[in-house]
């Protein structure tokens, strides 16, 4: 598969420090498949626009942490087998357990929407407890309550790992009840109004409207 490398010109802010995050900074370069663009003049313009979009939607992220034993990953997206087109880029390999269906898993994430140039619609680092500590998102793997793209990505991670995930609409939000749901009402409305916009869906934009980008850290798990 031919790959086009496109690096973001602007670096996004580093993730807020997490006690279990590594001290070695890890950066990743975005790779976009050229097979998604055709050679006609109209689609060539769209391709250029898409490249610009991906450059904005996938800026270089720096994760800092204190676990020196963590290993950096290769900066190349790959499609997960039997995932319906979910692509992942491992920013840091974990060294803990791998979750199984039925396990309770806790993750931190940044959720972004590609249709709005990488608009960040939610982040667990914005959800704080009474001590000001970020609250991870907890769910049971295989429950079906979480969008399938996240389940597919987490299922093959190890605790301590950080992974960037590109989720196509078919593996993203299929209803407004699927988690994770932004707690802020206006962000939630903006997200779902964009994804399920009937006019734009009728214009054939369904293949791009619901594309999601999640940066996920598997914090811990509990075997059931």
Image (cartoon, grey):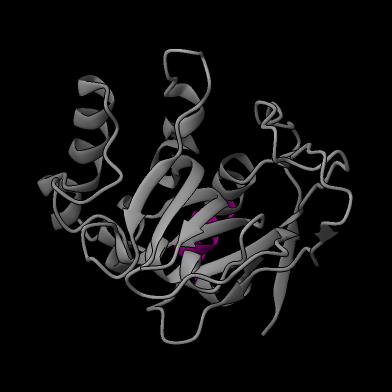
Residue 29 occupies quadrant: bottom right
Residue 8 lies, with reference to residue 43, above or below; the image says: above
Task: Using residue 6 as the reference point, say whether residue 38 is left or right of it.
Answer: left
Residue 92 lies, with reference to residue 151, above or below; the image says: above
Numbered circles on residues, count: 0
- Which residue sits at x=55%, y=77%? 79
Q: Is residue 34 magenta?
A: no
- Which residue sits at x=24%, y=46%? 195
Query: Is residue 37 something one can see in this rendering?
Result: no
Residue lying at the far front of the rendered structure:
224
Give x and y (percent) for residue 204: 23, 61
Task: Using residue 103 as the reference point, say whether residue 154 is left or right of it.
Answer: right
**Which range of residues does the magenta coloring cover?**
40-49
- Which residue sits at x=21%, y=58%? 145
Given residues 209 and 183, the one toward you in this image is: 183
Give x and y (percent) for residue 147: 29, 59
Residue 207 occupies quadrant: bottom left
Give x and y (percent) for residue 61: 71, 40
- Which residue sits at x=36%, y=75%? 101
């Amino acid at each position: 598969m031919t790959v086009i490398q496109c690096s973001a010109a602007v670096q996004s802010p580093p993730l807020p420090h997490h006690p279990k995050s590594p001290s070695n900074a890890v950066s990743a370069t975005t790779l976009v498949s050229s097979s998604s663009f055709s050679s006609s003049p109209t689609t060539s313009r769209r391709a250029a626009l898409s490249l610009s979009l991906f450059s904005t939607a996938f800026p270089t992220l720096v994760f800092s942490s204190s676990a020196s034993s963590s290993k950096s990953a290769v900066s190349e997206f790959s499609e997960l087998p039997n995932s319906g087109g979910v692509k992942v880029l491992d920013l840091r390999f974990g060294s803990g357990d791998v979750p199984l269906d039925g396990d309770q898993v806790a993750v931190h994430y940044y959720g972004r929407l590609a249709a709005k140039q990488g608009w960040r619609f939610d982040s667990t680092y914005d959800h704080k407890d009474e001590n000001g500590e970020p609250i991870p998102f907890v769910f049971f793997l295989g429950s079906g309550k979480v969008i399938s793209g996240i389940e597919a990505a987490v299922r093959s991670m190890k605790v301590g790992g950080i992974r960037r995930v590109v989720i196509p609409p078919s593996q993203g939000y299929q209803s407004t009840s699927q988690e994770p749901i932004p707690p802020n009402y206006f962000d939630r409305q903006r997200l779902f109004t964009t994804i399920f916009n009937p006019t734009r869906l009728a214009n054939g934009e369904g293949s791009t409207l619901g594309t999601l980008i999640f940066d996920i850290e598997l914090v811990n798990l509990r075997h059931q």
